[in-house]
Every structure is written in C-alpha cells, then in structure tokens.
C-alpha cells in the first residue's frame, strides 16, 4: 500500500489523479486531499477514498466541510497552515496540483518529509526552483514532472547521459488565438481565451495557453528541472498537441515523445515511475492523424516568450516577481479590468518597477516578499490602466 496525498484534489489535475487511483483503491492509502471552494467534491472524494484528512484553503468554509464529512471519520481542516500541515504528514507519493504560488509551501513541506513529489504546480519551480531542488536534495526526495512537456522530456531522457543533450524543444498548441489576426487580440474576452483547442484544463492555465504565459513558465520550468541553459531551450508551435517535447542530442538525434492530449498519461507515468503501467488513455492512430505540423512561435503575438528569456537572464527572484505579476494580470483580465494584450504589459512593467526592490538571496521569506511586492505593483498598474 502506498501512502498518497493530493494537493489541489478538486481541480483538473487533481480529478484526473483521483480517476487513476480510484481504479485501484486497494493499492493506495490516501493521507490528505485538499481543495479550496469546491467542498462537495472535496468531501465526496475524501469519503470515497477513505482519506485521513480533507483540507480546504478557505477558513470560512470549514463548517461546510465539517458538515459534509459528518459521520465519515475523515478529519476536516482549513487554511493555508492546515494545508502545509497536511503536506508534512508522511506520504510516499504526493501530487502537487494547487494552482498558483500557493502550491509552493505545501510542495516544500512534502519534500521535507522525503515524499516523491509529482509536480504539476509549475509556479513553485518558477518562483523558487532553487528552494525546491535544494529541499529535494537535502531530504533525499524525488521530484517527478507532471506537466506534459516535462514528463515527455523526462521520458525521452530515460537511460541517456544528460551531458549529451544539445537542446530541449517543448511544443505549444498556440491556444485559442493561434490563428487570430493580431489586431483582434486586444478585444479577446476571457470566455474566448478559456476555450482550448486540444486540452481540457483549469480556466487559468487555459487562458495562460492563449497568451503563451503558460509556455513562458514552462521554459523556466525546463531550465530548473533539467539544468540546461536558456539558449538550449526552444519552443515550437505544434497545433496537433501530440508531440509534447523533443530532446536533441549531440549526435544529431531528436527523441520525440508522442502521446494523446490526456493528462492522465503524464500523471500515470509519475504515479507508476519507474515502471510503466497500463493507462486508460487513447491509443493514437497516426495514420488517421495523417500529418504533424510545426512552426516557429511569433514573438509579436506572444511577447510572454521574450519576457521569460529576460527573466532567466536576470535570475535571482525575478521568477517570483514574474509569476506573481502574471497571476495578478490574469486576475485583472478575468475580472474585465484589462484587455488580453495588456497582461504582458503589466508583467513587463512590474518586472521593471520591482527591480532593485527585491532581495537577491533565495529564501522562502524573500520569495514571499517578492511575490507580495509584485502583486502590489501589478495591481497599481492595472488600476491605472483600468481607470
Ligand atoms: P484548477 O484550477 O483546475 O485546480 C486548482 C486546484 O487548486 C483546485 O483544487 C483548487 O480548489 C485549488 N486551489 C485554488 N486556489 C487555491 C489556494 N489559494 N490554496 C490552495 N488550493 C487552491 O487547476 P489545474 O488542475 O488546471 O492546474 C493545477 C496546476 O497544475 C497548475 O499549477 C497548472 O499550471 C498545472 N498544470 C495543469 C495542467 C492541466 O491539464 N490542467 C497541465 C499541466 C500543468 P477548488 O477548485 O476547490 O477551488
Ligand atoms: Mg504543459
């Protein structure tokens, strides 16, 4: 029996993870499930999977959670500290699938107890890659990628010597506005941005796919995960979303990972690693697919990719500033305060204004300070633009 916990259990990745473990309940002992607003799903899954504890991020929903769990024997808790406490309970495998910077502290806590961390929460690597990797090393914990591109790279690297990598290419579908005329982008609505051509994901990452901020985050995530230099990382637009990444080696070979656009593949790979287990995903019929197409990303359409390179060049805590500015700009776009193309301006201006105001040493406190500062700056910029 493996002890497992799922952080962000009520979200898109969390529910896909539960789908896999619920198929073999005898194999898993569920320690903790966490969510935020969706109390009915959190409580229902906690009871069904006999979790020890269910935690909501929102203290004002604790009574609702208690009521939903009444008589089940599942413990109820609430608030960020309770989520961190749940992450410090011994577990063998932990899914980190909270959305946003809120995933950092529980991810670190799980590493500190030596758990294998299946990492969907790319924000924690973008904000504080050094802290995450350092904690894993100190505590003998393993971090496994869940983001489809990074899982693909990880799989392509299996058995290879990392020194022989020349480049890593991650693909991007291009999101909802891949083929829109540039002039129309300014008027794009959140509902239009939240409809993805190939993947079924949470609202925030889907909009980040349309703006390419998701890919920008993933470029930084690639650098942190695989220790390559920024110039070794390339992005290719691949509308079919079937080739998730390619690794180029020094002998000229490119190893591509091809798979269905179903997150249960990458989640299942991390769940069963280092073995491969049968997974309930579509088997691709490439004869039916016919053609796979690739093109270079247009940096005018997607300035986020250029900004990511600037963030990597600047180093330090710029990743934390970048992520917080991006999250705040996304909030502003979803709330209708700023237009779609203004998000990149907000992020860029926040990075400029925050310069010299953030510490250089990466500690959890300094990351939190950079995050807080960037959110304040970005909010002010948004207010000015909206007013
Ligand atoms: P969702 O929005 O679907 O789910 C987010 C989860 O986090 C939910 O359980 C939500 O609870 C919870 N949550 C929200 N806010 C907080 C908070 N402040 N504190 C604690 N928990 C919170 O997101 P996704 O599943 O799409 O994405 C999760 C992570 O995985 C993100 O980092 C994303 O970038 C990454 N990822 C996702 C992919 C996908 O296919 N969806 C692919 C690759 C990476 P509730 O719903 O109850 O409010
Ligand atoms: Mg991805």
Image (tube, helix red, strand yellow):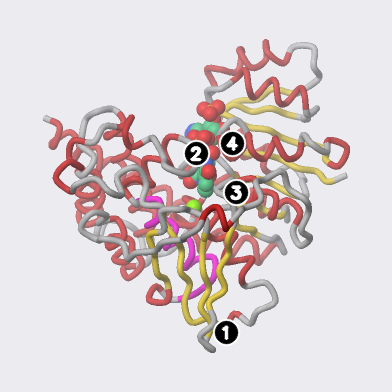
Q: Which residue does the numbered mark 3 point to in the structure image? A: 107
Magenta stretch holds residue 165: no
Is the CB atom of the residue marked by disc 4 within 8 angstroms of ligand 1's nearest atom? yes
Mark 3–mark 2 distance (CA, rounded to whole Å): 21 Å
For the C terminus, the quadrant is top left
Q: Which of 364 and 46 lies nearest the eye of the viewer?
A: 46
**Stretch in magenta:** 213-228
Q: Nearer the viewer, residue 200 or 222?
A: 200
**Mark 4: secondary structure:** loop
Look at mark 1 in the image and give the residue it sits on: 163
Q: Which residue is mark 4?
A: 8
State the residue at coordinates (64%, 59%). Answer: 143
**In the image, residue 382 lies at what x, y percent?**
20, 37
Mark 2, mark 1: which one is toward the viewer? 2
Q: Which of labels 3 and 4 is toward the front?
A: 4
Q: Secondary structure at mark 2?
A: loop
Indicate the position of residue 248 as horizontal and vertical percent values: 51, 78
| Label 1, label 3: how far apart the Cα atoms are | 28 Å
Q: Which residue is mark 2?
A: 201
Q: Is residue 194 above or below residue 131?
A: above
For the residues carrying marks 1 and 4, which lies nearer the camera in this image?
A: 1
Structural distance between the alpha carbons of marks 3 and 4? 11 Å
- Could you tell me if residue 202 is visible in this image? yes
Q: Is residue 212 shown above or below 164?
A: above
Q: Is residue 136 left or right of residue 186?
A: right
Up-down: is 329 above or below 231? above
């Amino acid at each position: 029996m493996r002890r497992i916990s799922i952080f962000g259990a009520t979200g898109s990745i969390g529910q896909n993870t539960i789908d896999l473990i619920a198929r073999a309940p005898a194999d898993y002992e569920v320690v903790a499930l966490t969510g935020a607003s969706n109390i009915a799903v959190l409580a229902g899954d906690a009871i069904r999977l006999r979790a020890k504890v269910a935690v909501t991020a929102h203290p004002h929903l604790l009574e609702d959670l208690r009521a939903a769990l009444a008589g089940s024997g599942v413990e109820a808790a609430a608030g960020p500290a309770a989520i961190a406490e749940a992450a410090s309970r011994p577990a063998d495998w932990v899914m980190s699938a909270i959305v946003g910077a809120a995933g950092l502290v529980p991810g670190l806590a799980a590493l500190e107890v030596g758990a294998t961390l299946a990492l969907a929460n790319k924000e924690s690597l973008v904000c504080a890659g050094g802290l995450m990797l350092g904690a894993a090393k100190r505590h003998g914990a393993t971090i496994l990628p869940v983001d489809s591109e990074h899982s693909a790279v990880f799989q392509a690297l299996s058995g290879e010597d990392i020194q022989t990598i020349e480049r890593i290419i991650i693909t991007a579908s291009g999101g909802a506005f891949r083929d829109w005329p540039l002039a129309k982008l300014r008027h794009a609505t959140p509902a239009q941005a939240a409809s993805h051509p190939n993947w079924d994901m949470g609202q925030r990452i889907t909009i980040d796919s349309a703006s390419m901020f998701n890919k920008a985050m993933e470029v930084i995530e690639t650098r942190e995960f695989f220790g390559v230099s920024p110039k070794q990382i390339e992005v290719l637009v691949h509308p079919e979303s079937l080739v998730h990444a390619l690794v180029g080696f020094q002998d000229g070979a490119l190893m591509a990972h091809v798979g269905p656009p179903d997150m249960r593949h990458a989640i299942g790979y991390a769940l069963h690693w280092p073995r491969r287990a049968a997974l309930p995903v579509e088997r691709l019929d490439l004869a039916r697919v016919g053609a796979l197409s690739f093109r270079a990303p247009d940096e005018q359409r997607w300035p986020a990719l250029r900004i990511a390179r600037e963030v990597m060049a600047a180093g330090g805590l710029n990743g934390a500033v970048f992520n917080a500015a991006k999250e705040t700009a996304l909030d502003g776009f979803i709330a209708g305060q700023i237009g779609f193309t203004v998000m990149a301006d907000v992020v860029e201006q926040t990075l400029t204004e925050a310069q010299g105001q953030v510490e250089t040493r990466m500690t959890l406190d300094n990351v939190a300070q950079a995050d807080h500062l960037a959110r304040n700056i970005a909010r002010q910029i948004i207010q000015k633009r909206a007013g």
